[in-house]
Image: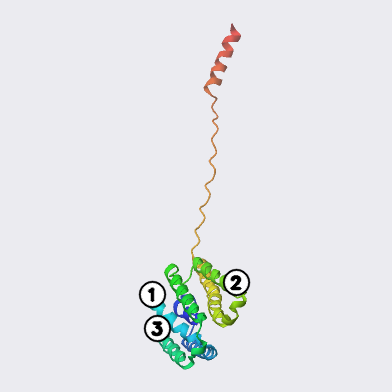
Amino acid sequence: MKIYDDMEDNPLIAQYCSSQFMEIIKVLIIASFTYASVHNMNFPIIIFIGDYLHYMMSDDTALSTDFYHAGMILALLLSIITFDVSKLGMGLILSIFGFTLYAYLDHTFFPEEYSWKKIIWRSLWIIGILVLLQFPMSIPYYDLMFFPLGYCMISIPLMLCAQWNEISKEPKEPKEPKEPKEFKETSKEPSQDASEKDTRLPMESST
């Protein structure tokens, strides 16, 4: 999903993507999302509710493309098909809250497609998730936590490539030529004091 998102928004990646490649990515997203939803019903619920809250609270362009609209419909259908009351728990509520909070902060404070601040921000999220994965209480939620972990781990290299490409295209300022040092011209004429001494010496000798 992150790869498709960057192919849509990041000009550096979009220039290398053909329409055929885009369609292949769409099929892979639908297939993987369906597979994950069948094995964990929380996935489509989190995606549907989280994306809808993100659209309502912070980004009214979050569903600006037909593919994202279709993705919301798919998430709703999968939520209905895979729904199981016995599997509802606090993990689902916390996941929706975390998803919405991350989307809100990310769009509000880092609206640009890529920047060094955004790279650091998502790196901190990776560190935070990796720390949480060390606790035994996180074991039942491994599959839910690997989703944002993979999202951030894919986005950081793509943003680094974009940043590097932007830096390499910046024109280098030409170095100003050094001005030659000005040498002081030494006067060949004797100084006034020296000339006065020369005129006094004959007179003193004559006396």
Residue 37 is marked as none
What residue occupies the far front of the structure in this picture? 86
**Does the image show residue 14?**
no
Tell which of 49 and 24 is nearer to you. Answer: 49
Q: Secondary structure at mark 3?
A: loop
**Residue 49 percent across, percent down from the top left:** 43, 82
Task: Please state which of residues 40 and 67 is positioned toward the viewer in this rendering.
Answer: 40
Front: mark 2 or 3: 2
**Residue that badge 1 annotates:** 57
Q: CA distance from mark 3 to mark 1?
A: 18 Å
Residue 116 position within the rendered picture, expressed as x and y whole percent measured from the top left: 51, 66
Quadrant including the C terminus: top right
| Distance in Å between CA atoms under marks 2 and 1 | 29 Å
Image height of 97 relative to 32, above or below: above
Pointer 2 or 3: first along the chain: 3
What percent of the width, then of the height, locates residue 104?
A: 43, 72
Colour convention of the picture: rainbow
Q: Earlier in the sequence, mark 3 or mark 1?
A: 1
Of helix, strand and loop, which one carries label 2? helix
Residue in the picture at 56% in, 71% down: 128
Disc 2 to disc 3, how far (Cα)? 35 Å
**What's under tag 2, amino acid-wise?**
Val
Under mark 3, the amino acid is Thr
Circle 2 packing at 10 Å, graded few (<14), some (14-19), many (20+), is few
Q: Residue 131, labelled with which disc?
A: 2
Q: For the point 46% across and 83% down, which residue is it? A: 47
Determine contact: label 2, label 3, CB under 8 Å. Answer: no
User: On the picture, is 60 further left or further right than 83?
Assistant: left
Quarter-of-image position of residue 190: top right
* Amino acid at circle 1: Met
Give me the disc on residue 65: 3
